[in-house]
Structure formats: C-alpha cells, structure tokens
Image (cartoon, rainbow, N blue to C red):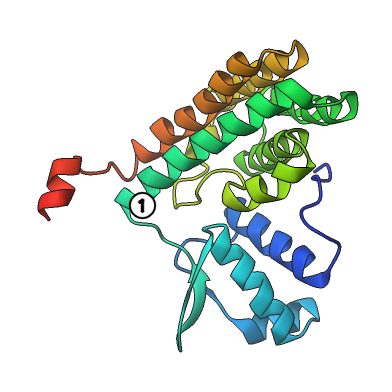
Amino acid sequence: MIPLPPVGDASQTSRLADDLAMAIHLGDVAPGTPLREIEIAEANGVSRTIVRAALQRLEAQGLAEITLNKGARVKHPSPATLADMMELHASLAAFAARHAAERADTERVADIRIFAEMLEHVAEDGGAAREFQHLRVGFMRALFEAAGPALAERLRSAAPVTPHHEHSLDDVSDTQGQTEAAKLAHDVLRAIEVGAPEAAAKAAERLIRRHAERTLGRSHKPAPRSARTAA
C-alpha cells in the first residue's frame, strides 16, 4: 500500500493516533472493541501517557469513546448519531473540495490525482476492500490538505474519512461499488483541476452520500425524525 499523507506533527502521539485510526478504518478493529492503554503501550513501545493522548485524538475524530473508570473502546454509534455524522462529513467534504478548487497549487492537485488514479486501478483489478479503503483515506487526506494549511488540520480531525461503523467497507466490497466510488473521486479531481468550486463541492458531497446510502441502507436506517422525537 502506498504511503498516506501525514496527519499532524511527527510526535509519538500523532503517529500512534494515526496507526490506531487506520486499524479502525481498515476494519482490523471492530466497533465496540476495548482499547486498553496497557496493551497498546506495550505493543507500541510507548508510555501510557502517549496512549492516553492518542485515544483522546481518536475520541475527537469520533472513532473512539472514553468512559470514566471504564476506559476506551472503538465507538459504536447509534443509528441517529451515525446519520447525523454522515451529514456533517458530506458538508465538510464539500467545503474542502470547494476551497481546493479555488486555491490548490500544482503539488496538492497532484497528490489528489495520485490517489484518484490508484482508486481507479484497484477498482479495475477488483482489489480487496481493505486496499481500496486505504486509498480512500489517502484521497480524503489529500483533499483536505489541498483546502489550505489553515483548514487542513481542523478538517482532518472533524472528518478523517467517513464515520466508522460495522458496515463501513460494505460499499467497496465488490467491483461495482469500487468503480462507482472511484468515478466520483475522479469527478472531484476533474472539477478541482479546472477550477470549478461548486462542481467540486457537489462531487465530494455525492461521494460521501453514496457511501451513506450503500452502507446505512444495509445496516442502520435511522427512524423518522418524528418517531425519534416521540421516543
């Protein structure tokens, strides 16, 4: 797998948080799994203080939940929360794409292109969902970086890819799903290359909403707002 754009600084906390986040996004650690400080510290050769700080970053990204006196675990969002988070991610992806189309330099656009092309190659070869997801993370990181340095870090922490849940990889588990996602990523790239902010924003939003439709539709379908209110 090709290296992903770095997140944060080069500190032990950033590297550990990124490693744990990727394990979650790639499906190696399922929702509800405990994230035990001692085990993580020993496995990675770091202090529990570093682990604690890394887990707090995962909590800020919506990937983990920390309960007093009970520790941390991979977050298992409720249907209503998950639907709301998808809305947030769609908005932030559109925001990033719009700004990327307005201000991205040649180097940043090239970074987006690398991942967009790799997504197409994996889809053509019928690659593993895990490999496609790795590249999808890279594409979104490159997109956020292209939005500008003042926005990149905040966007990454608020919307690292999409909200993680037990069916996160379902939409790219077959060739058709990968092909659809790769095409939408290419649509985002093309709009950025020609400097079309609104087209880029719409394509990025479609990319996230397609993921939501193909995964939430199979797993958690949120109840109507009136029913949630009554409850």
Closest to the observer: 173 or 159? 159
Q: Where is residue 220 in the image (x, y as percent from the top left)?
A: 31, 45
| 18 to the left or right of 163 | right
- The residue lying at 45 percent from left, 84 percent from top is 68
Residue 143, compared with residue 38, is above or below; it is above
Furthest-front residue in this view: 150
Q: Residue at 55% across / 65% down in the picture?
A: 59
The answer to whether residue 204 is seen in the rendering is yes
- Residue 188, percent from left and from top: 65, 20
Q: Residues within 10 Å of mark 1 (few under 14, many from 20)?
A: few
Q: Which SS class for mark 1?
A: helix
Horizontal side of residue 62 vs 218, given as left or right: right
- Residue 48, percent across and down? 70, 86
Front one among 199 and 212: 199
Quarter occupied by residue 162: top right
Residue found 54% across the figure and 20% down from its top: 202
Q: Residue furthest right?
A: 107
Q: Look at 72% across and 59% down and name the residue there.
A: 18
Displayed quadrant of residue 35:
bottom right
Number of numbered discs visible in the structure rendering: 1
Observer-nearest of 57 and 180: 57
Where residue 9 appears, x then y in whole percent?
A: 83, 60
Q: Does residue 153 sit above or below 97 in this rendering? A: below
- Residue at mark 1: 81
The residue under label 1 is which amino acid type? Thr
- Residue 132 lies in quadrant: top right
For residue 75, side relative to residue 2 (left or right): left
Quadrant of the snapshot with the N terminus: top right
Q: Outermost residue toward the top?
A: 194
In this picture, residue 58 sits left or right of residue 62: right
Q: Is residue 117 visible?
A: no
